[in-house]
Image: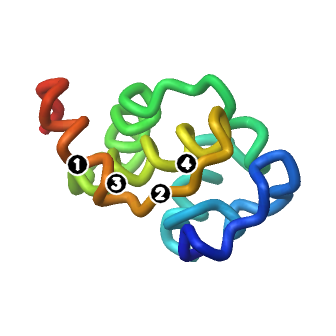
């Protein structure tokens, strides 16, 4: 969903209500065992990313990590931002 249209994080009930999450990334979250947005609170985006790479048997695009950072941030802070606003932070941390 586009970040500007997201409900408050506390009201998000479906994965597709999360910022930057479309059908494909919703399926990736389900593959990770995440069925509800609240399960992302306090999660480690880098661990989720590595686990997704492991489960799919392929290195995921770094923008997937940016998106995971965005949804964890949203659930922890109620601030919906576009995924690309996390790219510099990922790169500063030495991420891919």
Q: Nearer the viewer, residue 30 or 66?
A: 66
Q: Which mark is residue 64?
A: 3
Q: Nearer the viewer, mark 4 or mark 2?
A: 2
Please tell me which of labels 4 and 1 falls first in the chain.
4
Q: Reading the chain from its start, which is encountered first: label 4 or label 2?
A: 4
Q: Which residue shows up at 67% across the image and 45% down it? A: 78
Q: Earlier in the sequence, mark 3 or mark 4?
A: 3
The CA span between labels 1 and 3 is: 10 Å
Q: Residue at x 23, y 37 (%)?
A: 90
Contact between labelled residues 1 and 2, with CB atoms less than 8 Å apart = no
Above or below for 33 versus 15: above
Q: Is residue 14 above or below residue 91?
A: below
x then y, percent, for residue 11? 87, 54
What SS does tag 1 mark? helix
Mark closest to the chain's N terminus, 1 or 3: 3
Of residues 6 and 52, the one nearer the viewer is: 6
């Amino acid at each position: 969903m586009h970040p500007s249209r997201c409900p408050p994080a506390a009201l998000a009930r479906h994965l597709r209500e999360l910022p930057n999450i479309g059908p494909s990334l919703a399926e990736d979250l389900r593959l990770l065992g995440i069925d509800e947005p609240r399960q992302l609170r306090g999660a480690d985006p880098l661990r989720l990313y590595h686990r997704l790479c492991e489960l799919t048997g392929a290195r995921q695009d770094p923008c997937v990590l940016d998106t995971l950072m965005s949804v964890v941030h949203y659930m922890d802070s109620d601030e919906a931002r576009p995924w690309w606003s996390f790219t510099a932070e990922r790169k500063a941390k030495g991420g891919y």
